[in-house]
Image (spheres, rainbow, N blue to C red):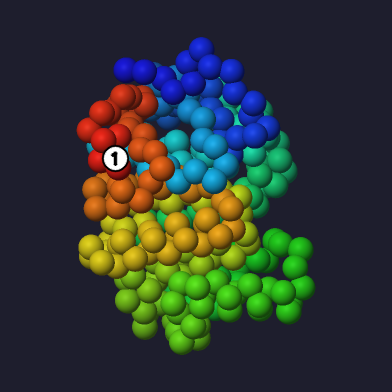
Amino acid sequence: MSQVLENTVIDVSKSAIAIHHLNHYYGQGSLKKQVLFDINLHIDRGEIIILTGPSGSGKTTLLTLMGCLRSVQDGSLNILGQELLHASKEAMTLARRNVGYIFQAHNLLNFLTAYQNVEMALELQAVTAAEADSRIRSVLNAVGLEDRMNYYPSNLSGGQKQRVAIARALVSQPQIILADEPTAALDKKSGRDVVEIMEKLAKEQGCTILLVTHDNRILDLADRIIYMEDGCLVDHVEATAAIK
């Protein structure tokens, strides 16, 4: 096994994500269990990274730490130059504003239209109503839902729901996009379509993508593939070769 940052000096101010000797645990006392082991990783701004590996290997836990959805317990996790170890709740909230998160199950609110679901992502942003409306319409157009803006999730296909989720993640113009199995519930064409849309829009906005997936059909879209097994980042020649 190898660690990506071992014995390497990195300027974290120029990184999207820089992780050093990160460990994570669930439970306490006799029930305490380590789930991440000495994670070292550096991701440049603008990179498109795929994180893959067996179920239960710790991928989602790592993603939620990067997304400021969990507190860092041990080691260093630096997002866009901000250290998250010992970060206050206020600092975590500020860091979260720079991250767009796309969940596996899209997590749309069924009582809101596609437009309104995307609009929610701008509630904490300092934008005018006119600018918010322009951004929402633009990003929904970009994902091919210009004629579905006023549809409720129950009237959208699985692929269309995931496109709304992508639009919601991108409308705040984040610097990092974290996607957790965004193609898991989609067929081959829909799955590739949503990832290609995500890739195109992210490149236009100049943001970094980290995508957790088991979907071998989209590995070629990544700049780099990272493999995780049993809570560790490991060398995986086959995964790396898949994009060459």
What x and y, as percent, mark residue 23? 47, 23
- Closer to the camera in the image, 141 or 78: 141
Question: The disc labelled 1 sits on which kind of residue?
Answer: Lys
What x and y, as percent, mark residue 114? 49, 77
Residue denoted by label 1: 244
Which residue is situated farthest in the front direction here? Answer: 244
Q: Quadrant of the N terminus?
A: top left
Q: Please give the name of the residue rendered at 49% of the width and 43% of the height, measured from the top-left corner.
A: 47
Q: Please give the name of the residue rendered at 48% of the width and 28% of the height, measured from the top-left corner.
A: 41
Q: Please give the name of the residue rendered at 25% of the width and 40% of the height, measured from the top-left corner.
A: 242
Q: Quadrant of the C terminus?
A: top left
- Answer whether residue 152 is visible to the viewer in this image: yes
| Residue at disc 1, secondary structure | loop
For disc 1, the neighbor class at 10 Å (few under 14, some 14 to 19, many from 20) is few
Does residue 186 appear to the left or right of 121 in the view shown? left
Is residue 73 positioned above or below 216 on the image? above
Does residue 224 appear to the left or right of 129 in the view shown? left
- Answer whether residue 117 is visible to the viewer in this image: no
